[in-house]
Amino acid sequence: MKARFAIGLVLAALTALSMSAPLTRATETVDPVADAKAFRDYFVKKFPKVKLEDFVNGPYSMNEDMRKQWEEKEEFPPYEFALDAGKEMFAKPFKNGKTYADCFPNGGIGIRQNYPYFDEKEGKVVTLELALNRCREANGEAPVSYVKDDMASLTAYMAFTSRGKPMDIKIPNDRRALEAYENGKRYFYTRRGQLNFACANCHVQSPGERLRAEILAPALGILNAMPIYRSEWAGMGTISRRFVTCNSQTRAVPLEPQSDEYRDLEYYLSYVSNGLPISGPGARP
Amino acid sequence: MRVFLAITLLILGASSALAASEADFKAAYASAEAAEKEAGTLRNQWLPTETALAAAKKAAASGDFDAATAQAKEAEALAKASIFQATSEKERWKDMEIH
């Protein structure tokens, strides 16, 4: 009887091991610190004249003419209306009397650089956009669209209060956090859509090059400028909107905003841009 | 005269055999839909597949089963290409990674 029990225990342990082994193997080779260093070194080597902190300015760091136009535009920036609207929305109490400030550390001021973060309770990545909607729902308000103006305005205001602060994304000592990071990396480098493009084709292999009338932005620091006013959109766009649009442009069916894949992608891209300043909200052609 | 009649009959017979029926469309559409569903489980659907599926349905609704079947077959080919892409990219993405 004891022998049978022991065999059963061993079998159960082996089964559990075999189930967890692939995950362990997959994460034990993940080295985000080395990745981030290699990522940064690649761009610095590719663009030796661009200052490290200037990569957050996307195409303006790569093209002198565009930079001049942008600097003039910044005197009356096109995101200013969104910024004012965001500030007002942020301060306006919900029906229950609470505000967004009650949901965030430091009242939500100067914290953009810490998003997205890995929530160890939930076991998933939480982005700023997601946290804002969760705040609304926790206070009895309907969530707002992740791809429309209200969310862009709110995140524009929050980014503005963090301008100049270095991106500071942490990966806790949690296997699931490493998996999320690795999933984000995989998404970034995976070709998709009928045009067979990965994010990296444009933003690693071809920054500074033209894609039709656009100058492609480098992936390093690309999210530090979000949300952005895009002349092409004639309006503001969130990180969710950017991901959805990128997928559509490759003729892939976009995923739903704030899907696990997009959250992980944001986690990866933000982590490898650690140390670069927040410059959002930004403006792009 | 007889030869002409025979050729005419042959052509008519051949063209009626080539024309797609509603059943042909339904079979082609079911295959395309199944392939697109599989692409969906791989989180890798393509926009042109969706467009072709919608065009197939629209053509079928107007009774043009030739066009409907052709669009459904196009959709299936696109969906299979997206499945191939997702499968081959499972490991190939690493080739592009910065080290």
Image (cartoon, coloured by chain):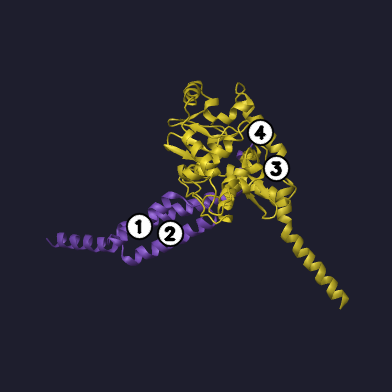
Check disc 2 and report its element: helix, strand or loop: helix
Which chain is indicated by disc 4? A
Q: Are marks 1 and 2 in contact (CB under 8 Å)?
A: yes
Residue sitting farthest toward the right: A2
Distance, label 2 to label 4, CA atoms, is: 49 Å
Q: Would residue B59 appear left or right of A65 to someone viewing this image? A: left
Please name which of the two marks, 2 or 4, marks the residue nearer to the observer.
4
Chain shown in yellow? A
Would you name the residue on which mark 4 appears? A166
Q: How many residues crowd mark 1 within 10 Å: few (<14), some (14–19), many (20+)?
A: many
Q: Which mark is residue A170?
A: 3
Residue at image mark 2 = B32
Location of mark 1 (residue): B56
Q: CA distance from mark 1 to mark 2?
A: 10 Å
The amino acid type found where label 3 is placed reads: Lys
Give the Cα distance between marks 4 and 3.
Answer: 12 Å
Which quadrant of the structure image shows residue A122? bottom right
Neighbor class of circle 2 (other Cα within 10 Å; few <14, some 14-19, many 20+) is many
Rendered purple, the chain in question is B
Question: Which mark lies nearer to you, 4 or 3?
Answer: 4
Which image quadrant for residue A140? Answer: bottom right
User: Is residue A244 at least partly visible in the picture?
Assistant: no
